[in-house]
Image (cartoon, rainbow, N blue to C red):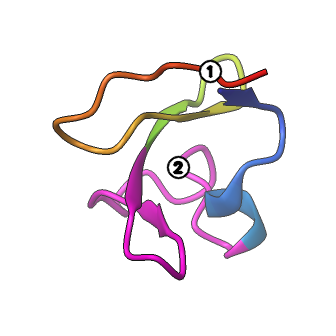
Amino acid sequence: MICRYCIRYALGQCLKEHPTLQGPLSLQLSDGRRFPLHFDCRECQMHVLPPAGQVFSPEF
């Protein structure tokens, strides 16, 4: 999933404003699943990736 909302920006850790900040970020659900985040700062987008070892399969 691609989001225009950037959690790094919301936390005051925008890499455009603070290029020395590094380190991975992820979102963790209450059931323990952890979704890694990838940041495309040039396009000002945040990508939510599937949990490690899982293939994304959308349920409609």
- Eye-nearest disc, 2 or 1: 1
Q: Residue furthest bottom?
A: 30
Residue at the (41%, 35%) spot, across then down? 50
Q: Position of residue 28 (x, y in %)?
A: 47, 71
Q: State the extent of the magenta-drawn residues as a range.
A: 11-36
Residue 29 in picture, x, y percent from top left: 53, 72
Asked whether, in this view, residue 29 is left or right of residue 26, the answer is right
Residue 44 within the segment the image draws in magenta: no
State left or right for residue 1 relative to residue 4.
Answer: left
Quarter holding the N terminus? top right
Residue closest to the eye, 15 or 31:
31
Q: Label 1 amino acid? A: Pro
> Is residue 29 depicted above or below 49 in this figure?
below
Numbered tag placed on residue 15 in the rendering: 2
Quarter in which the C terminus is drawn = top right
Tell me residue 24's x, y (percent): 30, 57
The circle drawn on residue 58 is: 1
Residue at 67% over, 75% down: 11
Q: Judging from the image, what secondary structure is the residue with disc 1 in? A: loop
In the picture shown, does residue 3 fall above or below 11? above
Of the pair 50 and 13, the residue shown nearer to us: 50
Horizontal and vertical percent for residue 40?
55, 25
Query: Of the residues shown, which amino acid type is indicated by label 2?
Result: Leu
> Is 22 in the magenta?
yes
Mark 2–mark 1 Cα distance, whole angstroms, equals: 30 Å
- The relative height of residue 57 versus residue 10 in the rendered view (above or below) is above
